[in-house]
Amino acid sequence: MDDFSPIPDYDTHGWFLKSVVEILFKNVVFATNRDKVVLWKHPKELLEVFDFSLQQTGVTQDKLLTLIKNTIKFSVKTGHPYFINQLFSGLDPYGLVGQWITDALNASIYTYEVAPVFTLMETCVIREMCSMIGPEWKDGMFCPGGSNGNGIALNLARFQLNKNVKKTGMSQFPRLVLFTSEEAHYSILKFSSFIGIGEDNVILVQTDEVGRMNPTHLEECIQEQIDCGASPFVVVATSGTTVRGAFDPLYQISAICKKYKLWFHVDAAWGGGLIFSQRHRTKLNGIETANSIIINPHKLLAAPQQCSILFVKDENILYECHSKGAEYLFQKDKYYDQSYDPGDKYLQCGRKCDVFKFWLMWKAKGSSGFAKHVDAIMDVAEYFERQVLIRPEFQLVSKRQYINVCFWYLPRYLQKKKDVMDYSIQLHKVAAQIKAVMVKHGSIMLGYQPLKEFPNFFRFVSQNSALGVKDVDFILDHIAEIGNAIYD
Amino acid sequence: MDDFSPIPDYDTHGWFLKSVVEILFKNVVFATNRDKVVLWKHPKELLEVFDFSLQQTGVTQDKLLTLIKNTIKFSVKTGHPYFINQLFSGLDPYGLVGQWITDALNASIYTYEVAPVFTLMETCVIREMCSMIGPEWKDGMFCPGGSNGNGIALNLARFQLNKNVKKTGMSQFPRLVLFTSEEAHYSILKFSSFIGIGEDNVILVQTDEVGRMNPTHLEECIQEQIDCGASPFVVVATSGTTVRGAFDPLYQISAICKKYKLWFHVDAAWGGGLIFSQRHRTKLNGIETANSIIINPHKLLAAPQQCSILFVKDENILYECHSKGAEYLFQKDKYYDQSYDPGDKYLQCGRKCDVFKFWLMWKAKGSSGFAKHVDAIMDVAEYFERQVLIRPEFQLVSKRQYINVCFWYLPRYLQKKKDVMDYSIQLHKVAAQIKAVMVKHGSIMLGYQPLKEFPNFFRFVSQNSALGVKDVDFILDHIAEIGNAIYD
């Protein structure tokens, strides 16, 4: 057969597909953990050694296998225990095959007709998680990432304020303002611009010494905006801030929202997975008082990218706010009850199935498996923090509240010497220099950033519950070793 | 090892993962084509026969394999040649393994650091496609579906009109209005609401007898809105409408946009893949005059879900309109040139890699492979239309322009009898009745819908270039057979 059709044929593709799976098993899935996290190349170098070019004519399957091996070779091993650069890591075997099955079935989740198993599965997972949040919680939707989920929540809040906005738009509206902490995720700003609110109308509330929103300041800000004639409509609290992992005081914020009749959204993209842990879910206390919550199972729970769920208390609002009733998809004369079609409550039309991988992980491990996973990670983070406190060459930025441990490596000449000229400027350079060496070694990928008045510091985060205390020792030893080599 | 950690271990997971791959090869990827498209169950039945429930404790790998087999059993076989229900179908073997590799590497595409191969690959694919559109085209971004891409384009258009909107929002703005045809995709309405424009401010321009936007009416609408004091800001043309596959007259619309200084967006999600075909790309003539274009390789080109690309002419606008400069991701003191980090031009933060599967398909087949694929599909659609015209029991809704063939099956008592009482009401019921039988047989999944004054009709669309004239004959024979059984 001519090899341009989207239909697999055993004679033409059997060997190739099997070879790819073998390569994946050997070089990615079951690769030895102590391989490098990354084989670093500068972009210009990589452009030279990797054949990105596209041509008129296709290449052979042998050549494709070489390209695939090179893709793996030069890609970051995000499943490696020392990939602690972002808010995701690990490679869950059940999640992975869940994705593979999803891909092979290549469904789009708008109607029961086209995705019978997956539409019911979404409902099941959403209901199960709703019941974990609280008895009043009724509905939810899968989103293409937490940023989008936050944006959708802002739009729901605006719709709740004045349902005409769906039809009339905002041009006749008063100036709407929203409130979130100065350590909230940048998606609140991005999506405020996108939905027509404007980033100037995002009021950043002060945070305390560990990064939690200050509710007194929140109320001052609300009052100030009302006095200026603006219309507050939503407060976005964070359960697990991106950098410091702070948990905003939900009950206090909730009371303020109630007083001023504001929608209460909780961005628990990062921290929401704690809901599975009896030991640690108290950090989420008060989350049940919100109107909407975003939780990303692809973060703490280590589901593969991407799996984000927006939960809402009001069971009608997603349909009311989003529906358009396109008749080519949501026919009113179907051979089954149309209420099983979730598509019209979404903004996306075609939508990849993100539920199956997560459901399969849940089925494989049970809720108790997620709990053990979360507890193990929290224990490692606690050990990490203790080590930072003990070792003289490290300093904690602020007290740990979650699995984020924020710390500086202090070169000897900066240790206990805050009076060094330009102390902050000097310290600011350290993390970037050490990181560059680590990446070039390919040994560890660890994130760093400045925050408020703090110069650049490292942020340790791991969602990989296979990481143990020995790994923590290695990571800290390794940073110290590189630091010593550079600064001593 | 305790089986809750996101790290694959050969002893614990080797057998399971291999078993899943075997099941996928046997039951999905290389399944015989003549299996049923769907094993239909009513939702309530499926809830009884499939164990969706989630528990405290995990289940065994054996039990998981059973659940996986059931997931496959009760899912629609979207790769089946007789899945012609939506604007996607087929199962491309290169696209599929591209997804599997993407999943195993589990990257998130915001920085070069975390996704070196995939960030450069995105740039390469975007540049290559830009050069196919026209020399002035400079940039693009991958979107979570065409609906989102259309929404982002509307926001770019608003930003171009008045860059303050990013900061101030829309509350001080005049009433902004946009124009699209009455047969455009419903995402224009959904996203107009979402971004704060409001669906009342979407002016639906009339279409002609085959579904193309009427440019004279467009100009009248623009003039009318200006006379009312509204501010037109964008026209959305469609290259390949969802139901009839119509191509709006781009040059004429472009001239009007120029005259009134409006942003010109082309929704070529469905039709854009024609760009690869020398024989058929003339349907896209004038697309190069637009300001932005959305093309979904996951539609016509049969890339797996999901792969949508928004192209823009202005090389700075995506950064200008979307950037926020979050320092924890886009550090200014990086060990490489930060311009290689694409993340800040996106609204999404974490973002799944959608480029690799498409790049791998392109590499495997070459541009000429996509061309052959497109040409083969167009030939089949032409044959389908001819058969509809020849056979007395079928009637064309309107002349075919693309691979959408819209047609009625006419029961004998309605053939050539437009004077039958309630002709339209009678005819309206036919497609739904036949479809219900086909789905219950599991033989064919074929979409239907009403449109404008037309009662329910079938829409044939296939992106599967392995579908041949024999399949067309089978599909039409099968519909006629069911129709005969019901109505004669």
Image (tube, coloured by chain):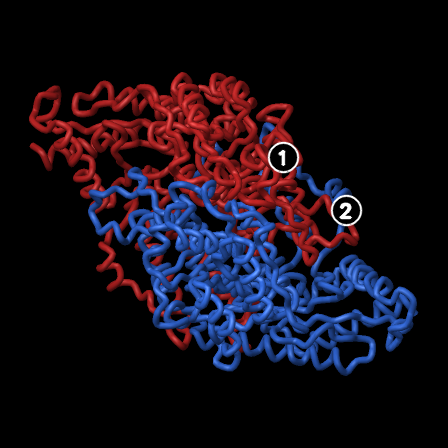
Chain colours: A red, B blue
- In the image: residue A217, left or right of residue B18: left
Q: Mark 2 lies on which chain?
A: A
Decide: few, some or many residues near mark 2? Use Cα within 10 Å; few <14, some 14-19, many ≥20: few
Against A288, residue B277 (above or below) is below
Task: State whether discs 1 and 2 lie on one chain.
Answer: yes
- Circle 2 — which element? loop
The amino acid at mark 1 is Asp
Left or right placement of residue B256 versus residue B346 in this view: right
Residue under pointer 1:
A139
Tell me which residue sits at (47%, 74%) in the image: B286
Quick one: label 1, few (<14), some, or many (20+) residues within 10 Å?
Answer: many
Residue at image mark 2:
A337
* Side of A109 where A190 appears, left or right: left
Q: Position of residue A356 (x, y in %)?
A: 57, 44
Q: Where is residue A438 in the image (x, y as percent from the top left)?
A: 21, 41
B423 displayed left or right of B84: right
Judging depth in this view, the residue of A295 and A461 nearest the camera is: A295
The x and y percentages for residue B190 are 58, 50
The residue under the point 51% across, 34% down is: A294
Q: Which of marks 1 and 2 is nearer the N terminus?
A: 1
**Quarter of the image containing the C terminus of chain B?**
bottom right
Mark 1–mark 2 Cα distance, whole angstroms, equals 18 Å
Label 1 chain ID? A
